[in-house]
C-alpha cells in the first residue's frame, strides 16, 4: 500500500505537458511499402512521428521535422527502402498485376 501512495504522489508531482498534446494517426502507402501507418504529435513547433512500413520488406521510422516558412527540415532513424528489391513471380498473373518482369 505504501508503494501505491508513493507512486501516486510521484505521478502528481511530475506531471507532463506531453499528455495534453494532440496525437494524429494517418495511413499511407507506396512502393516498396504498401501500408504505412503513422502516429505523430507536435511539441514546441516540432513534429515527432513514428511509423511502421509493411510491404515487400518491413521496417520502422522514428523522426522529427520542423517547418521554416516554405521548407521543412528533419531527421529520422529507420527504414528507407527495401533490403532485397529483386523478387521473382510464381505465376504470370502475379507478375502482370504487380508489374514485375
Image: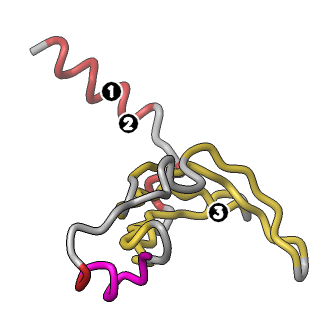
What secondary structure is the magenta-colored segment mainly? helix
Percent across and percent down for residue 76 are 66, 49
Above or below for 83 versus 99: above
- In the rendered image, which quarter is residue 78 located in? top right
Q: Going from the N terminus, do you reach mark 1 or mark 3 first?
A: 1
Above or below for 5 versus 68: above
Quarter of the image with the C terminus in it: bottom left
Q: Looking at the image, which residue is at 47% across and 33% down?
A: 14
Q: Looking at the image, which residue is at 89% across and 71% down?
A: 68
Label 2 residue SS: helix
- In the rendered image, which quarter is residue 53 located in? bottom left
Quarter of the image with the N terminus in it: top left
Alpha carbon separation for disc pair 3 and 2:
27 Å
Query: Badge 3 is on which residue?
Result: 47
Q: Looking at the image, which residue is at 47% across and 67% down?
A: 32
Q: Looking at the image, which residue is at 54% across and 63% down?
A: 41
Residue 33 lies within the magenta run: no
Disc number at residue 99? none
Mark 1 vs mark 3: give the one in front.
3
Read off the magenta span.
94-101
Alpha carbon separation for disc pair 1 and 3:
31 Å
Disc number at residue 9? 1
The reply, left or right, for residue 49 in relation to residue 90 is: right
Query: Badge 2 is on which residue?
Result: 12
Label 3 residue SS: strand
Toward the top, the furthest residue is 2
Alpha carbon separation for disc pair 1 and 2:
5 Å
Q: Residues within 10 Å of mark 3 (few under 14, many from 20)?
A: some
Above or below for 24 versus 62: below
Percent across and percent down for residue 83 are 50, 47
Amino acid at each position: 500500500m505504501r508503494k501505491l501512495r508513493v507512486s501516486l504522489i510521484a505521478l502528481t508531482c511530475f506531471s507532463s505537458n506531453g499528455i495534453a498534446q494532440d496525437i494524429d494517426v494517418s495511413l499511407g502507402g507506396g512502393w516498396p511499402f504498401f501500408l504505412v501507418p503513422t502516429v505523430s504529435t507536435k511539441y514546441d513547433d516540432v513534429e515527432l512521428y513514428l511509423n511502421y512500413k509493411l510491404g515487400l520488406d518491413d521496417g520502422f521510422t522514428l523522426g522529427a521535422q520542423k517547418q521554416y516558412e516554405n521548407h521543412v527540415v528533419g531527421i529520422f532513424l529507420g527504414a528507407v527502402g527495401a533490403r532485397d528489391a529483386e523478387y521473382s513471380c510464381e505465376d504470370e498473373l502475379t507478375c502482370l498485376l504487380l508489374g514485375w518482369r
